[in-house]
Image (tube, coloured by chain):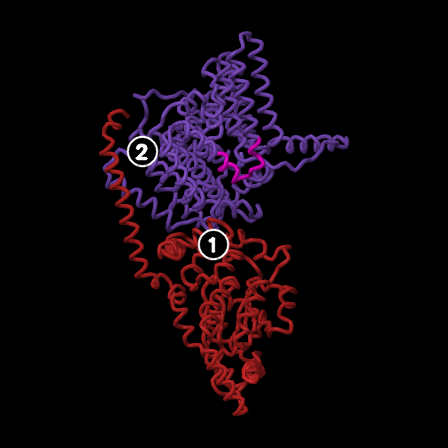
Chain colours: A red, B purple
Amino acid sequence: MTSETNASPTVLRNELKVLGALVVMLLVVEGVLQLGESRLSIDIQHMKSFGQIAQQLQSQDEAASLAAERQSASTVQSASQILFLGNSMTRYGLDQESFVRECSLTTGITPEVIALHPDNSRISEWYYLYRNFVAEQNRAPDILVVGFAMNQLCDAPSKTPDRIARYYGVGIDDLDTLSSEDLSNVEGWSDFACSRYSATYATRQRVERRVLSALIPSYKESSNLINNQSAPKELQGENVELTYRRLQDFLEMSSEGGTEVVLVALPTQDGYDLDSGLVDVCRGKVTLIDARIIPGVSPDMIPDGLHLTPEGAARYSTFLADWLPVQQLMARHDRQLLNNGNAVRVASEGERAAQ
Amino acid sequence: MLFNSFGFWMFFVVVLILYQQMKRRGQNVLLLVASYFFYGCWDWRFLGLIVLSTLIDYSVALGIAKAEADSRKRWLLLISMAANLGILAFFKYFGFFSHELGELLGAVGVPSMMPTLNIVLPVGISFYTFQTMSYTIDVYRGDCKATDNLLDFAVYVAFFPQLVAGPIERASKLLPQMLTDRKPTAVDFRDGLFLVISGMFRKVVIADNMAPLVNTIFAQDINTLSGWDVMLGTYAFAFQIYGDFSGYSAIARGISRWLGFDLMTNFHMPYFAVSPSDFWRRWHISLSQWLRDYLYIPLGGNRYGTLFTYRNLLLTMLLGGLWHGANWTFIVWGAIHGLLLCGYRLLGDERPQKENRPTFIQRIPNMVLMFHFVCFAWLFFRAESVTQAFGLLGQLSVWGAPSALAQTTFGMLVFFCVPLLLLEWWFDEKHDPLWLTQVRWELRAAVYGYLILMMVFFPPPVPAEFIYFQF
């Protein structure tokens, strides 16, 4: 120890070199991931293009003028836009071609379909996604279809705050919601901050899954078992009273632009109960379509229990097009938009009169 | 505040910066405040217990040092023992014994009048209680001088790096460090860095990635499990608990080195042990030495013949098991280790001379055998109940195609634990657990790079608390 203590400057120099090498290594990894982040998965690619996809949505002004056009032409056939929001169940479940074709056949409307479906997301993520890429950008689809299963609409903190930080466009406006709903302690905020500024940190679980899926036998199957085992009780729906505060905020936000919201309970292999609390929240506010059981969709079309095969997706999409009351929804949507517009106009005239 | 949390490292950076600006007395005040804050973050309600334990042992030790009559010294020691063990017994064992007594009385038809209390177990109570007790006993034996500085003693009891999960430091080693000036050197920085990085790797990568597999296997219906599941689940637990506890100890030692303190080594590659006595020289060394010095030797050790030696070994290990928690599973775990120690002793287990030490390859058969004995005991340690443990053992007779979970567990053990074992094998060959600090900086940077990238890219699904906090 004495000789080592005497050699302190060399020891310190060497340790600084070690630290320097580690910093360089981390910077290189960060650089590589910054550049190649999108190549890690289709899902990251999708999340990185949220902004681009959302730009396809009509603006609120456009929606209003189109509504006026439709009203004057007494038809709903022109340019109706449907946004599908969900997770990988929607990604696998929605066959856009089948949906549009069937919709066209049954209602005479050929909708423009846009879809946002980040993996492993639920209402806690959809809230930020819609708020930052749709509502705050003054965009408004005519119809919003939210696909969910089990308890994906109930209140629970986000399981992926790292992804919210990096891909969901959150800003200062979201801090209140983040602190009250998703990030309750220093750890959560630290994770959030690291993910926001570091691609390495934000994508590490994605890298982990890719590597382990490639190297570890039966990893995917075991992960499902482990996740089910360790899922919080509210997500398992075990003797916990579920609440829907965030869903209500979401519905309020999405209906502000005149958008008609439809919730669709998606099919799963094992089936699930619809919580009565959810039905109460929907009553009188939104359309709820029960697609848990679809004629012609057999359990073998949901091989992993959650995601539909292409054949199952075609049947689900056709079923949805048949049951989605597009004409009524569009009519109600247009009425609401035009009424809002009138309200604004009357107020302006009133102001002028007062002057 | 977990060592593997952002919160802890923010706290530690603040403490370290302030610490560097101060002289010894100021540093000790800072350490005491920081330690109480650290403990208060777990549960401030139990800070009073640490203060109480500190005051009792401080006063009793001073009383012993001043007393001239042996009988007075003995009485004072008894007061300290009664107070410390009383606190421990109440918080840790009252519920268990009252429940068991109630069951026993119920079985013979006598209604139990035992009160049932829902007592919260204060974090780390077993560690700091044993640490303060060792101080008073050492003062009584004359192995250590009683300190009249309450501040220094309070820091010795509550020193935050090792407060909640050890190592259980002896006063003769740690207290003098509280009393002298400390100036961390470059060597302390280098060794601390190694200990912190390797400790974090063991906790975050090894232990926390094994935890979900173990939890899932041990939560399954026993009849759905095969021998593969049980065997691999137990191996995974062996690495989980090793990574968890040795990781904590290494981080505790590392951050202490950065503060200028030298804590004892608590783990020394335990799964390379070739016999039970070798295992206990490598596993939770601070506890096994405590049990040896304050229980086994006072009971008579090996001085009164073979039978007494076996009795003493068994008693020591049973109480060692009970120290871990109030549950029959821990008692059975202790009994198994006691029996193993007796069995190996019967077969002539002796510590090999350094010059006759077999090579690593020669030791492999004994290491594998010992590892399986240890795993057998871990099965009881991890099980929720003795019944579950026997049920799992029964499944070891059911072998078929390995389930998906068993295959994954095997793959994860190879992916995460084999590199750790290779690294440890390298250190073992060099007879130096800090060997990496002696190699060229480029090689050290490469190994650290691997450990850090593993921490970054293989985070556990759910960060877990350290297992030993509950003991």
Numbered tag placed on residue A223 in the rendering: 1
Instruction: Using residue B255 as the reference point, say whether residue A241 is left or right of it.
Output: right
Q: Position of residue A161 (x, y in %)?
A: 46, 57
Tell whether position B42 is magenta.
yes
> In the structure shown, which secondary structural element does the residue marked by tag 1 occupy?
helix
Magenta residues? Answer: B35-48
Three-letter code for the amino acid on which mark 1 is drawn: Ser
Mark 2 surroundings within 10 Å by alpha-carbon count, few (fewer than 14), some (14 through 19), many (20 or more): some
Subunit of mark 1? A
Tell whether position A228 is magenta.
no
Q: Nearer the viewer, residue A196 or B380?
A: A196
Q: Residue at x 64, y 68 (%)?
A: A279
Residue lying at the far front in this picture: please name it: A355
Q: Residue at x 63, y 68 (%)?
A: A281
Numbered tag placed on residue B427 in the rendering: 2
Residue B81 placement: quadrant:
top right
Residue lying at the far bottom in this picture: please name it: A73
Instruction: Using residue B148 as the reference point, say whether residue A325 is left or right of it.
Output: right
Q: Position of residue B360 (x, y in %)?
A: 32, 31
Three-letter code for the amino acid on which mark 2 is drawn: Phe
Give the mark count.
2
Magenta stretch: helix, strand or loop mostly: helix
